């Protein structure tokens, strides 16, 4: 017995430095807040992440039904319906007031109320109206729709951040990890991505951060991305992206995967969690930044510049001549034949503190009208909305705008005898394909 005890003590003494080195090895791979190797995972986190499935990550099925109205022979009204199905990924991250909150991408679950272009919803013609939309949790793409699948209600959706928060009344498994800080990521940090590629099965992909601090302005988005080289696929949009904390050895949610580059292999972008916190924590979209007020015109500087001579400038397809006239600044709109003709069609005289007036040349002298006597007649329609599309100011990629006239059928009211239609002007756009594509559903 004494011999065995001494031998065991010797073995423990020899193994102690090796065990200590093994414990310190993960720390040697931490040059920043997050690790660059999975060896930094704690034992509990390693046990959770070795499985194929994560109970807190779900496959989402978003369904929308669109109705298109048209007229057949004899003026008979026809209704045609289109069903659009997308599959993506979401994760449950908090329970609040009897609701389990699920985060995903806006482009996975968001459908426009009315399609205005051929690329709004693939396979649905323009001018179709959404009549039904639902989001369910399913086991995978192959699972048939059923009454037992939990339905999710929309809490908040932000297109600029490409994030949506949904709520389930049924209890869900919550993420065992906290939200981290995407600003602390560095190139080379290891990441894990939990999702449902192609909506087929749960999977974990491992990669590294290859780029940070990229502002994404495509498709109307406005957020800061970081790029990873993990091999991801359509259906993974909305997947949580995890980085290993060097301080605790636990994974932290540092972003939500939302897009990849078309034609690239293993090059994808993730919305940083720092931009998503206002939505995930406070359940409301961040207020847009206030527009900076335009600086007041500096009349003194303008007078100084015009003292050297008249200035010509383009305005609305015409030329305006600005010049000093008896101490006042005069803006004269020249006719369309300029420079062959210098005839003044209209002039605006700015007398500073005195009253501004509009001067209209006539055959017998000029007619001066005080500016306060002018009234502005509002224009109907959207003829002046050059940068707006169908009432939405969201920019698109490489838009080349054109006007399209469409007629929208009006259902007969209680006092109507026929199904007459009322015309309404809408706008449509034709856009080129971007270098980046949404990854919400398989092709």
Image (tube, rainbow, N blue to C red):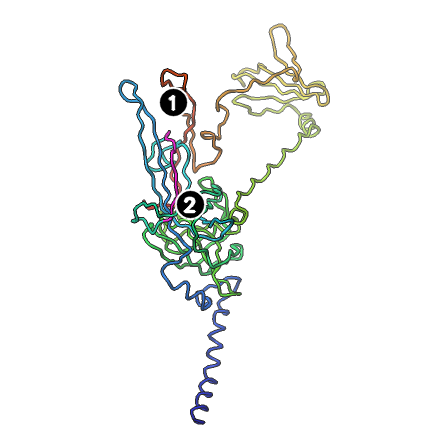
How dense is the environment of label 2, judged by Cα within 10 Å: few (below 14), some, or many (20 and up)?
Answer: many
Return the residue nearer the eye: 3 or 193: 3
Tell me, yes or no, if residue 38 can be seen here.
yes
- Going by the picture, which residue comes out furthest to the top? 364
Percent from the top left, x then y, of residue 16? 48, 81
Q: Is residue 263 left or right of residue 181?
A: left
Percent from the top left, x then y, of residue 107? 42, 43
Tell me the SS state at disc 1: loop
Residue bounds of the magenta highlight = 127-137
Residue 196 part of the magenta-drawn span: no
In the rendered view of the protein, which quadrant contains the C terminus? top left
**Dominant SS type (magenta):** strand
Q: Is residue 13 left or right of residue 201?
A: right
Q: Is residue 417 above or below residue 70?
A: above
Q: Which residue is pictured at 46% across the width and 44% down the height?
A: 162
Percent from the top left, x then y, of residue 400? 42, 31
Q: Is residue 388 above or below residue 167?
A: above
Please tell me which of labels 1 and 2 falls first in the chain: 2
Q: Which residue is pictured at 56% across the width and 41% down the height?
A: 287
Return the residue nearer the eye: 5 or 321: 5
Residue bearing mark 2: 152
Tell me the SS state at disc 2: strand
Percent from the top left, x then y, of residue 192? 42, 59
Residue 15 appears in which quarter of the rendering?
bottom left
Q: Which residue is pictured at 47% across the width and 87% down the height?
A: 9
Q: Which mark is residue 411?
A: 1
In the rendered view of the protein, which quadrant contains the N terminus? bottom left
Q: Which residue is pictured at 53% across the width and 16% down the height?
A: 340
């Amino acid at each position: 017995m004494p011999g065995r005890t001494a031998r065991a003590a010797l073995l423990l003494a020899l193994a102690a430095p090796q065990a200590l080195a093994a414990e310190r090895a993960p720390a040697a791979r931490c040059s920043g807040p997050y690790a660059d190797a999975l060896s930094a995972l704690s034992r509990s986190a390693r046990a959770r992440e070795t499985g194929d499935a994560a109970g807190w990550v779900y496959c989402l099925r978003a369904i929308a039904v669109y109705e298109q109205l048209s007229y057949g022979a004899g003026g008979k009204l026809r209704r045609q319906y289109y069903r659009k199905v997308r599959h993506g990924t979401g994760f449950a991250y908090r329970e609040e007031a009897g609701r389990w909150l699920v985060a995903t991408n806006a482009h996975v679950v968001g459908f426009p109320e009315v399609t205005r272009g051929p690329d709004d919803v693939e396979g649905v013609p323009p001018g179709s109206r959404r009549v039904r939309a639902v989001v369910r949790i399913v086991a995978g793409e192959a699972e048939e729709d059923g009454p037992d699948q939990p339905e999710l209600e929309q809490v908040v959706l932000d297109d600029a951040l490409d994030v949506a928060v949904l709520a389930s009344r049924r209890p869900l498994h919550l993420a065992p990890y906290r939200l981290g800080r995407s600003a602390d990521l560095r190139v080379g940090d290891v990441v894990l991505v939990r999702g449902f590629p192609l909506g087929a099965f749960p999977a974990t992909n491992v990669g590294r951060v290859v780029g940070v601090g990229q502002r994404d302005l495509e498709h109307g988005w406005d957020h800061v991305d970081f790029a990873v080289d993990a091999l991801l696929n359509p259906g993974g949009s909305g997947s949580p992206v995890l980085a290993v904390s060097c301080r605790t050895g636990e994974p932290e949610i540092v972003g939500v995967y939302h897009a990849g580059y078309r034609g690239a292999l293993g090059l994808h972008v993730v919305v940083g969690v720092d931009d998503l916190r206002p939505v995930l924590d406070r359940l409301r979209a961040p207020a847009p930044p206030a527009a900076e007020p335009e600086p007041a015109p500096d009349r003194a500087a303008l007078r100084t510049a015009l003292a050297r001579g008249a200035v010509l400038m383009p305005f609305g397809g015409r030329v305006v001549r600005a010049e000093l006239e008896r101490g006042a600044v005069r803006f004269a709109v020249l006719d369309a034949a300029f420079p062959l003709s210098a005839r003044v069609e209209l002039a605006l005289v700015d007398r500073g503190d005195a009253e501004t007036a509009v001067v209209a040349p006539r055959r017998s002298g000029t007619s001066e009208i005080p500016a306060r006597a002018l009234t502005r007649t509002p224009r109907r329609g959207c003829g002046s909305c050059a940068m707006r599309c169908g009432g939405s100011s969201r920019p698109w990629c490489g838009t080349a705008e054109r006007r399209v006239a469409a007629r929208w059928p009006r259902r007969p009211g209680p006092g109507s005898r026929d199904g007459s239609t009322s015309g309404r002007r809408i706008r449509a756009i034709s856009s080129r394909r971007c270098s980046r594509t949404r990854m919400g559903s398989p092709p």
